[in-house]
Amino acid sequence: MHSQFQQKWPLPAQPMPIAIIGTGDIVNDAHMPAYRKAGFDVIGMYDIDRDRALAASAKWGVGRVYESLLDAAGNGADCVYDIATPPSAIADILPHLPDGAPVLIQKPMGDNLDQAQAIQSICRAKGLSAAVNFQLRFSPMMLAVRDAIRSGAIGDVLDIEVHLNILTPWEIFPFLKSMQRVEIAVHSIHYLDLIRSVVGEPESVFVRSLGDPRIPELAQTRTSLIMDYGRCLRVLLSINHNHRFGRKFQDATFRFEGTDGCAVVKLGLLLDYPHGEPDELWFCNVGGDWQKADLSGRWFPDAFANIMSNVQRYYRGEDPQLLTSVDDALQTMKLVESCFAQIDA
């Protein structure tokens, strides 16, 4: 049902080796499961915390733990460098990588717009084929939604709404405690990036992002955000990460409503993260019944293999476009900066 819509990114004809820099939870929860499933070869790992790198390499059977960043960069340009570090470290890592190499950078693209622009400048100066890991775009459910919208299956898009009422285990991301920008910068940035990839750039934004007295160590964990696209398209995000009252009224949905139909996505990953529930995708056309699409995979881990495939295929000349290139990702960072400009005003 609705199987005609794209859900997978084609694999590269000749997969490239991958060197991972940074071995935190996201690598164990998503990168490595995705790469194992896709058959990608991770040839080594590096982390400033060597014990953490040793533990990850042992868990996944990766044969080498690099002694230093320069040791990792010794693989040359015919290797994908998968940077999975906190955003503040990215600009210091990139200069050490081989000129011209393919790179996948964990989102966000730095802590702020200044860092994002510095990252873009480094990538251009070194000729890096660099993308930012905005992998929600590449999840099976969102690939299908974008394909449905592109094909006209739901008509002209009139309404996009993101509604989250969940309990996020922030304790597994200790580096966030030192950040002044949290919720939009590391979470809702996914939604902003996806939305602008579907309907383009908004004219303006109206936003408030708040902390919560129950989690005083984090700057923001709740967001209300309107993206202004003029008189026809309404875009709204309502985000609460602190619903501590059980599963019954938790919710994580993304609704795309058009003139002829509607697509609703359940972001199952966010319900009991990082284990999650199954993602769901539903379609309905005017006068018809809701139909559940058969999904070929989940946000975690499949999106990570799909975006890595785009990086490798673009580098090899198999894909015409690097969808989340640093140039495109900079536009998402500019949108995030617009949000925080309102919050800080």
Image (tube, helix red, strand yellow):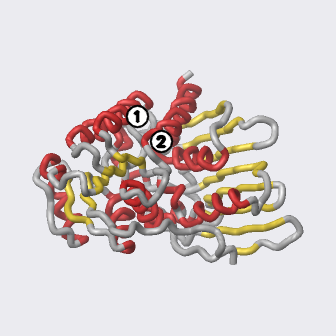
**Residue 106 spot, x, y in % from top left:** 38, 49
Q: CA distance from mark 1 to mark 2?
A: 9 Å
User: Callout 1, which amino acid?
Assistant: Ala
| In the image, residue 35 above or below residue 114 | below
Residue occupied by mark 1: 116
For disc 2, the neighbor class at 10 Å (few under 14, some 14 to 19, many from 20) is many
Residue at position x 83%, y 55% in the image: 259
Residue lying at the far left of the rendered structure? 67
Q: Considering depth in this image, is 90 or 326 the residue closer to the camera?
A: 326
User: Callout 2, which amino acid?
Assistant: Ala
Residue lying at the far top of the rendered structure? 345
| In the image, residue 157 above or below residue 154 | above
For disc 1, the neighbor class at 10 Å (few under 14, some 14 to 19, many from 20) is many
| In the image, residue 189 above or below residue 255 | above
Relative side of 258 to 105, left or right: right
Report if residue 240 is visible in the image: no
Quadrant holding the C terminus: top right
Residue occupied by mark 2: 329
